[in-house]
Amino acid sequence: MSASLEDYRRVVGSSSIDELVLLADRVRHRRLQHINSTSVGGGVAELLARMVPLFRDLGIETTWDVIKGDQAFFEVTKAFHNALHGGKVTITEDMFDVYRQTTSMNLGDMGASGDFIVVHDLQPAGLIAKKENSGGHWLWRCHIDVSTPDPTVWGFLKRYVDLYDASVFSMPEFAQKLSIPQFMVTPSIDPLADKNRDLPASQVTAVLERHGVDPERPIITQISRYDRLKDPIGVIRAYRLVRRRYDCQLILAGSGASDDPEGEQVLQEVREAAQGDPDIHVLLLPPFADLEVNALVRGSTIVMQKSLKEGFGLTVTEALWKRKPVIGGAVGGIKLQILNGVTGFLVHSAEGAANRAVELLGDKQLRESIGANGHQHVRENFLTTRSIRDYLLMMLATEHREKDITLLTESRK
Ligand code: UDP
């Protein structure tokens, strides 16, 4: 269910919505096209699903297209993704060929009809070759942490990125040496989405019980795709340390993403690590299980996001919004969301995570005050309406910049 723009007034205040209407008026009748690599699973699909209807509400004709790729392509792009995150990955010339071949197939299949075309992440980045014929302003939106990328993969990708009109990163640490302007925009969550809206306590309890979780005992939860960079095994290690002090339970819940072929293998590793402990609940959720994810987080005492690398980490935002104390890996965008000791705790190891969990489990007041701070931090910084405003400003800035360049070039003639 999508909420209309007017519904957000009561959440973010009227002045924020008035500002959006005003800004949108200046880019009205422009067509905005988003392109990414999956319509379901992961943060980008989550963001687009919520933002597209709001852009339309604002009078901006907005479309969302997904590139096609086979298993081999997504294996390559996942390897590139890991390499850009600074992981040690073997990269071969064949992999670049697979990327180029799928890119040229998508170049043939996909129309680029926007006045603004926003291409998300590395998988569709090669579509920039369309710019010459289709026109429009092209923005490359990078959602991952590229602060220490593998130089070979970044070198390959950069040749595409430099052809865009502008790039967008989630935080200044990810900025790169590029010949094009770089915007900094943090992602956001939709407070009115099924994943985030308030739920009756009975619904929360029912979901926990359906999964065999005892609502009366403390629950530590991590919601994430089964991905090694989310460190689910580290979460199990932390939980086992906490268990020495508290009779608690662990939920690891995740679903697959069609552009992430590693999930099944990682899930298998997690199941093996959890074996023999009936208080560890390893859940494989179906796509679009938003109410269920919402309930699992709301029913938790503590939420973990012990990532080893993270572009932003919408799961952190979602938990903070629900007033949960969050323990997060001190990486990437998690550091923007968790102000250590104020809106949650940042950790560097399973032991650190366990210590913080023990501290939180022993102090209800601490849990509540940190949870309240986290909620406020999200309200002020990480709601969809703020992202929409940033996009509108980027559209305006990009148009103006190009007008200025045209004027400059003409005056030099
Ligand atoms: N998510 C979900 N079901 C799951 C696991 C994750 O709906 O089983 C959602 C999660 O709530 C969040 C998004 O997928 O909205 C994950 O975004 P994040 O930025 O945390 O990580 P990414 O998967 O993009 O690396």
Image (cartoon, rainbow, N blue to C red):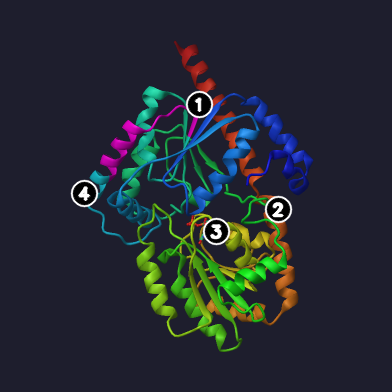
Is label 3's Cβ within 8 Å of ligand 1?
yes
* Residue 166: x %, y % from top left: 48, 35
Quadrant location, the C terminus? top left
Among numbered discs 3 and 4, the one appearing first in the sequence: 4
In depth, the one of 184 and 14 nearer the eye is 14
Q: Cα distance, mark 1 to mark 3?
A: 34 Å
Q: Amino acid at mark 1?
A: Asp
> Disc 3 designates what residue?
289
Q: Is residue 182 left or right of residue 325?
A: left
Q: Is residue 110 magenta?
A: yes
Characterize the local packing of mark 1: few (<14), some (14-19) or many (20 or more) Cα atoms within 10 angstroms. Answer: some
Among numbered discs 1 and 3, the one appearing first in the sequence: 1
> Disc 1 designates what residue?
115
Is residue 100 visible to the viewer in this orientation of the structure?
Answer: yes
Q: Cα distance, mark 4 to mark 2?
A: 46 Å
Labelled disc at residue 248: none
Secondary structure found at label 4: helix
Give the number of callouts: 4
Q: Residue at x 40, y 29 (%)?
A: 111
For discs 1 and 3, the disc positioned in front in the rendered view: 3
Q: Residue at x 37, y 65 (%)?
A: 264
> Disc 2 designates what residue?
379
Is residue 299 visible to the viewer in this orientation of the structure?
Answer: no
Q: Amino acid at mark 2?
A: Arg
